[in-house]
Image: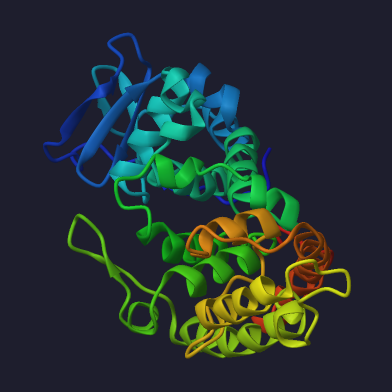
Amino acid sequence: MSSIARPFKRPRTGDLPDKIMQPNVWKDDGNVILEAENTRFRVHWSMLSQHSTVFRDMASLPQPTDHAQVDGCPVIQLSDSAEDINLLLTAMYERHFHDDKSKRPFQLITAFLRLGRKYDMEQYRTDALDQLIYEYPSNPLNWEMRGFFIHTGSEEPRHNIIDVINVARENHLFSVLPTAFYECIVELSTEEIFEGLMRRDGSTSKLSFEDQRRCILAREKLSQVQLDTTLRWLLDDELPAPTCIMPENCLPLRYQVVVATVRPTPWLVGAIAWDTFMRKIDMFGESFCGNCMTHARRLHNNGVKSFWEAIPKAFDLPGWTEATDFE
């Protein structure tokens, strides 16, 4: 028997008000009905048991005769949202629904995490964690190469930054937090960090007060860190390089980059590798000479590695190798 406490109950006969049948997950030959909020789902014990040890244990118990049934099926009341249950069951019965990670709604990821943990569905929980780790990796190379699975699948991508932090906290996904927090302070204004962002349904995605404070302090810390690491080549007279062949060109360009990234307010670019950094900087069609370019690229990319190591500490989080998920 699973050691996980039973997260549901069977209603007694007479305790069943009229409910909405979920047509997407209503199997006429199903032999159990799950009830969440005001919605019922008729499914198969075999399908539930295949994915969940909790439901497998439930199915093995004798069915009490005094508990309510509908069309001969026992009714199991769940405390979860109908939306989460609908997403999970749809994924069970329609594999294509979640095979394409680029089209997964963020709500599906959260359903996999919440219900995967609650009902001991290791496959779905691990699948969701793998996707979040890909989107919010723990090393700068993967950060640079990452896809945008969660954001591509959403009509409101910027809202997910806050939601990811809250979901990671809820599910103890500590390895995801540093990068998620970093993206939050890069993408959101101070007002958005404090006020939150409105979702399409009118609700607000908002950080806790402690995490709001964490973001504001970390933004100040990392703005300074990047000057000592990634952007150090801009401020320590590293350019023009000793072998520069166009000092009359490279020195003014260096000042131009300083203005674009450091003054009057630092732009957080510490985690961006050289090639991406240069694409983001408006050089008005000009470029450093080849020797300066080689020199600056080496210093910049070495600085990114040092900057990356500083990210968790800036948010007062465990280091990259210390974070453990699901604890």
Q: In which quarter of the image is residue 250?
A: bottom right
- In the displayed structure image, the side of residue 270 where residue 162 appears, left or right: left
Q: Indicate the position of residue 184 as horizontal and vertical percent values.
A: 49, 70
Q: Is residue 15 above or below residue 21?
A: below
Q: Indicate the position of residue 44 as horizontal and vertical percent values.
A: 43, 18
Q: Residue furthest left?
A: 18
- In the displayed structure image, the side of residue 23 where residue 249 appears, left or right: right
Q: Indicate the position of residue 65 as horizontal and vertical percent values.
A: 37, 28
Residue drawn at x 43%, y 61% as measured from the top left? 163
Q: Residue 184, can we see it? A: yes
Q: Is residue 123 above or below residue 199?
A: above
Q: Quadrant of residue 224?
A: bottom right
Residue drawn at x 78%, y 63% as measured from the top left? 301
Residue drawn at x 29%, y 46% as measured from the top left? 155
Nearest the eye: 320 or 265: 265
Q: Indicate the position of residue 144 as horizontal and vertical percent values.
A: 65, 51
Nearest the eye: 245 or 122: 245
Nearest the eye: 145 or 164: 145
- In the displayed structure image, the side of residue 291 where residue 183 appears, left or right: left
Quadrant including the N terminus = top right
Residue drawn at x 36%, y 15% as measured from the top left? 30
Q: Residue 323, can we see it? A: no
Q: Quadrant of residue 255?
A: bottom right
